[in-house]
């Protein structure tokens, strides 16, 4: 099968497979390549469980779709996170990196991670910044889904810091959409 792929690839692009991989690696930072080739926390949880928040976000710019799920305990700590992403290497790397960063954090702290942090850490090229924004928006959506299921949770009811952070994120999203 690999031999057939190599022959097809060579006939389509008229370049050896090793050269095309080198060209791809030239455009992306090693961290993106690592998260793309070895994604962390891929999978799903049962979305009906009360401790699971599910966020789904897509990008019209490129057709990518990202789902992030959070497993949040009674103290508001993200005990686990999973993702499934259909898209380019930068989208997969952004979601993989984000899940690594948020596991073990309180939801309030996790919500402070924004698309600029992800893009900077992965050294994303400018044309791929929407991938990090998609990860941030999927995280926010997952939290909102969890919050909707857990209205009486001490981390949700009466927590002005989280409410302010969500308003700030909504404002950032609006500004970003206006730029695009």
Image (tube, helix red, strand yellow):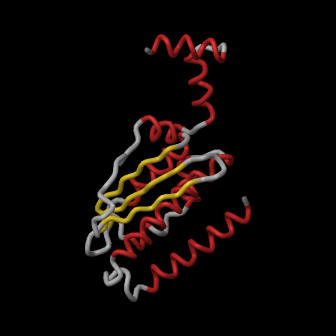
In front of the other: 81 or 54: 54
The residue depicted at 35 percent of the width and 81 percent of the height is 151
Locate residue 59, reporting x and y percent: 60, 53
Picture mark count:
0
The outermost residue toward the bottom is: 158
| 101 vs 178: above or below | above
Locate residue 25, reporting x and y percent: 57, 30
Locate residue 139, reporting x and y percent: 46, 62
The outermost residue toward the right is: 179
Relative horizontal placement of residue 27, taking residue 103 as reference (left or right): right
The outermost residue toward the left is: 74
Q: Quadrant of the C terminus?
A: bottom right
In front of the other: 117 or 134: 134
In front of the other: 87 or 109: 87
Locate residue 50, reporting x and y percent: 29, 70
The residue depicted at 41 percent of the width and 42 percent of the height is 39
Relative horizontal placement of residue 74, taking residue 22 as reference (left or right): left
The residue depicted at 57 percent of the width and 14 percent of the height is 8
Relative horizontal placement of residue 130, taking residue 48 as reference (left or right): right
| 117 vs 160: above or below | above
| 99 vs 3: above or below | below
Q: Quadrant of the N terminus?
A: top left
């Amino acid at each position: 099968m690999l031999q057939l792929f190599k022959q097809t690839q060579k006939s389509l692009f008229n370049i050896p497979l090793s050269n095309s991989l080198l060209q791809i690696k030239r455009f992306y930072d090693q961290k993106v390549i690592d998260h793309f080739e070895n994604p962390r926390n891929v999978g799903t949880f049962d979305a009906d469980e009360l401790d699971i928040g599910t966020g789904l976000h897509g990008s019209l710019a490129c057709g990518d779709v990202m789902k992030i799920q959070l497993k949040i305990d009674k103290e508001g700590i993200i005990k686990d996170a999973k993702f499934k992403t259909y898209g380019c290497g930068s989208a997969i790397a952004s979601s993989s990196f984000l899940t690594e960063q948020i596991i073990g954090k309180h939801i309030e702290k996790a919500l402070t991670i924004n698309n600029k942090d992800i893009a900077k850490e992965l050294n994303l090229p400018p044309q791929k910044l929407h991938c990090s924004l998609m990860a941030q928006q999927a995280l926010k959506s997952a939290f909102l889904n969890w919050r909707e299921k857990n209205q009486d949770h001490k981390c949700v009811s009466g927590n002005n810091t989280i409410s302010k952070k969500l308003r700030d994120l909504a404002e950032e999203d609006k500004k970003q959409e206006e730029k695009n």
